[in-house]
Image: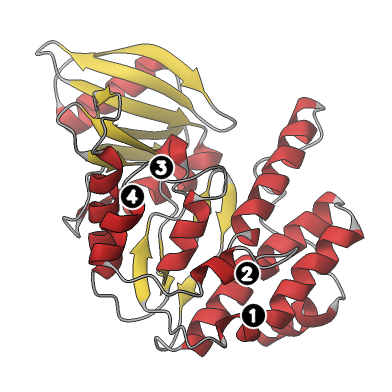
């Protein structure tokens, strides 16, 4: 979608006359700062029509997080999609360098989000983590068996199959199989996950501090999951900011077995899915550079592998 077309879409949705200044581009979208004559500013993403579902899912995720009134997210200003392309417009946010109290405020707000009551695990429709399809669907209840089934069938199985399609080594696939076979044993310490709405991709690049000191999160991959999945993702490439953990645990008790599940030897039960996502993303980026990857379909129908629990669980859901 061209800047002129995006400006016309903004005028159609919001009125006014808008001009767009290019910011950056990702694998699937361009980003812009939009301004109108009255000084209003928006952060705008535009993409081809084939990527409309990614922008729609992002907007829906932000609306769901905002509805809890627990942590700041960008306000959705407009979303439009047609054969000509897709556009997502969000309020422009001014960030500031995190101050010494940022970690504690982030922990407090995230604990409040995770404590917001949810009836069961899952999500109402498929969405995306980055540009990777994230399978969803609702569980029947909120039991441990429901959580394990969701995590296995909607996270590990599709990711393993997509990785197999990309041609990763058999050693990695065997480690993922081992995770699937051992999930129940990793909860033998009595942890009973409760359904929590999570951001789903909360690495350091998807959180910041606003000029007023409030934490803000963005680019979500939401689902209702065990909150431990959120925390493990936050630790995938580092650690939460100083002060986070005491404030978080004051508002949402963390089971002592979390460390064991997070650091399970070779194939941790909570971290592998985001880690595998990044393996998949790196391989896909290399293929894109070589002109070999079809971003519109390659990850939507991964090949099935005749291997242990993966085959059994795919058959059980088809």
Secondary structure of residue under mark 4: helix
Residue 291 placement: quadrant: top right
Judge depth for marks 4 and 3 and give the one in front: 4
In the depicted structure, whether residue 231 falls above or below residue 264: above
Q: Residue furthest right?
A: 170
Regarding residue 74, the answer to whether it shows in the image is no
Residue contact between numbered discs 4 and 3, judged by CB atoms under 8 Å:
no
Mark 2 vs mark 3, CA separation in Å: 24 Å
Badge 4 is on which residue? 244
Badge 3 is on which residue? 219
Q: Which of the two labelled residues, at mark 2 and mark 4, occupies the earlier sequence position?
A: 4
Mark 1 vs mark 2, CA separation in Å: 7 Å
Residue 81's x, y, as percent?
39, 40
Judge depth for marks 1 and 4 and give the one in front: 4
Judge depth for marks 2 and 3 and give the one in front: 2
Badge 1 is on which residue? 183
Residue contact between numbered discs 1 and 2, judged by CB atoms under 8 Å:
yes
Mark 1 vs mark 4, CA separation in Å: 28 Å
Residue 278's x, y, as percent?
65, 46
Q: Which of the two labelled residues, at mark 3 and mark 1, occupies the earlier sequence position?
A: 1
Secondary structure of residue under mark 1: loop
In screen coordinates, is 170 left or right of 190?
Answer: right
Q: Which of the two labelled residues, at mark 2 and mark 3, occupies the earlier sequence position?
A: 3
Secondary structure of residue under mark 3: loop
Badge 2 is on which residue? 269
Categorize mark 1 by other alpha carbons within 10 Å: few (<14), some (14-19), many (20+): some
Q: Which of the two labelled residues, at mark 4 and mark 3, occupies the earlier sequence position?
A: 3
- Name the residue rendered at 57%, 88% in the picture: 188
Mark 2 vs mark 4, CA separation in Å: 23 Å
Mark 3 vs mark 1, CA separation in Å: 28 Å
Categorize mark 2 by other alpha carbons within 10 Å: few (<14), some (14-19), many (20+): many
């Amino acid at each position: 979608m061209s800047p002129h077309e995006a400006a016309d879409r903004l005028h159609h949705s919001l009125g006014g006359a808008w001009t767009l200044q290019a910011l950056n581009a990702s694998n699937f979208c361009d980003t812009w700062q939009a301004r109108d004559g009255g000084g209003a500013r928006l952060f705008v993403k535009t993409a081809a029509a084939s990527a409309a579902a990614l922008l729609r899912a992002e907007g829906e995720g932000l609306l769901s997080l905002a509805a809890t009134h627990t942590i700041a997210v960008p306000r959705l200003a407009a979303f439009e999609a047609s054969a000509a392309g897709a556009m997502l417009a969000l309020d422009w946010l001014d960030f500031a360098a995190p101050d010494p109290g940022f970690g504690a405020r982030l922990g407090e707000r995230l604990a409040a989000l995770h404590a917001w009551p949810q009836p069961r695990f899952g999500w109402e429709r498929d969405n995306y983590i980055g540009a990777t399809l994230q399978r969803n669907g609702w569980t029947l209840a909120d039991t441990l068996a429901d959580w394990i089934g969701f995590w296995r069938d909607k996270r590990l199985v599709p990711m393993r199959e997509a990785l197999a399609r990309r041609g990763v080594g058999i050693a990695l696939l065997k480690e993922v199989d081992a995770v699937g076979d051992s999930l129940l044993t990793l909860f033998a310490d009595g942890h009973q996950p409760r359904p929590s709405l999570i951001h789903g991709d909360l690495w350091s690049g998807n959180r910041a501090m606003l000029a007023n000191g409030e934490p803000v999160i963005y680019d979500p991959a939401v689902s209702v999951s065990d909150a431990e999945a959120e925390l493990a993702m936050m630790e995938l490439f580092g650690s939460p900011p100083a002060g986070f953990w005491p404030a978080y645990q004051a508002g949402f008790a963390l089971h002592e077995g979390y460390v064991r599940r997070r650091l399970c030897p070779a194939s941790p039960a909570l971290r592998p899915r985001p880690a595998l996502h990044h393996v998949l993303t790196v391989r896909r980026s290399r293929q894109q550079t070589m002109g070999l990857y079809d971003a519109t379909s390659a990850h939507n129908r991964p090949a099935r592998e005749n291997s242990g629990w993966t085959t059994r669980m795919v058959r059980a859901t088809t």
